[in-house]
């Protein structure tokens, strides 16, 4: 199973001091479509993880020079920027106490050496799904935060004049309702006349204007 063409391969760190095991893991992970980074001891692995383009997943050998896998796990979980890193701990130690120690140190999964190829692939795919879901969630959160920047909401009690319907702003100035709402929200106004106002206000004004025009013509000395 390979990574889909429209997705960027997930970068995986292999921290393993045994050259044969390291070569085996590198071959298998690249075959699965991962972007592989190699470190031969714990200190080198930590340097890789501290880069800006740090891998999103890590396969850590328990027993390594400088820093072992469990120590690395503890460092990772204490570092905010690396808390989302998916860690698979790889070791010959397979007692229940060993497994508990590795998981309690911060490993997400645990696999004993020599790893079964199908099990290795399955566990790595599970980690890949988690990483991609985290990326999707991060993107959705960023999109939501960006959208919220453009959202304005009116809240609380608005002092409004009972007669002219102007609204008092926070500077005690009385503003026309449409101006106040436009400035404090994303709403825009398009003016019109409702049927009731047309009958009660506009129509009488038109009739008065017409009657006044007729009267003016009757008393116009030029006619």
Image (spheres, helix red, strand yellow):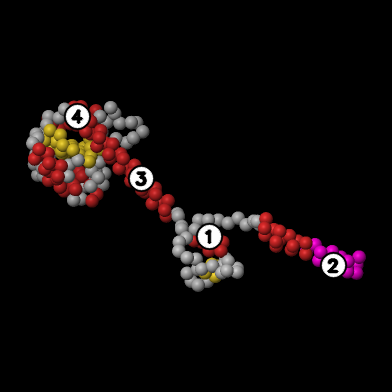
Q: Which residue is mark 4?
A: 119
Q: Identify the residue shown where x is 35% and y is 45%.
A: 139
Query: Magenta stretch containing residue 213, yes or no?
Result: yes
Q: Which one is earlier in the sequence, the residue at label 3 or at label 2? A: 3
Tag 1–tag 4 contact (CB < 8 Å) = no
The image position of residue 55, as x and y in percent, is 24, 41
Q: Which one is earlier in the sequence, the residue at label 4 or at label 3? A: 4
Q: Which residue is mark 3?
A: 139
Which of 181 and 160 lies nearest the eye of the viewer? Answer: 160
Q: Which one is earlier in the sequence, the residue at label 1 or at label 2? A: 1
Q: Identify the residue shown where x is 23% and y is 51%.
A: 80
Q: Which residue is mark 2?
A: 216
Estimate how packed mark 2 is, as few (under 14), some (14 to 19) or many (20 or more) residues with alpha carbons within 10 Å: few
Residue 42 visible, this angle: no
Q: Identify the residue shown where x is 23% and y is 31%.
A: 122
Question: What label does residue 182 carry, if any?
Answer: 1
Q: Nearer the viewer, mark 4 or mark 3?
A: 4
Q: What's the magenta region?
A: 209-223
Query: Magenta stretch containing residue 185, yes or no?
Result: no
């Amino acid at each position: 199973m390979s990574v889909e063409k429209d997705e960027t391969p997930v970068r995986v760190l292999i921290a393993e001091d045994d050259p044969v095991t390291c070569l085996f893991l590198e071959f298998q992970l690249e075959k699965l479509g991962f972007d592989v980074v190699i470190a031969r001891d714990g200190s080198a692995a930590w340097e890789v993880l501290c880069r800006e383009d740090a891998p999103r997943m890590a396969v850590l050998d328990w027993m390594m020079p400088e820093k072992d896998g469990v120590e690395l796990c503890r460092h990772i979980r204490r570092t905010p920027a690396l808390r989302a890193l998916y860690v698979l701990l790889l070791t010959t130690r397979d007692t229940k106490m060993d497994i508990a120690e590795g998981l309690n140190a911060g490993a997400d999964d645990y696999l004993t050496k020599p790893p079964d190829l199908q099990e290795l692939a399955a566990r790595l795919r599970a980690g890949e799904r988690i990483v991609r879901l985290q990326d999707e969630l991060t993107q959705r959160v960023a999109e939501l935060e960006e959208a919220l920047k453009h959202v304005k909401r009116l809240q609380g009690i608005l002092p409004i004049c009972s007669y002219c319907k102007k609204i008092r702003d926070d500077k005690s100035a009385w503003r026309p309702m449409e101006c106040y709402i436009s400035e404090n929200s994303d709403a825009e106004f398009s003016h019109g006349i409702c049927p009731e106002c047309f009958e009660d206000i506009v129509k009488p004004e038109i009739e008065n204007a017409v009657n006044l025009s007729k009267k003016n013509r009757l008393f116009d000395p030029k006619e």
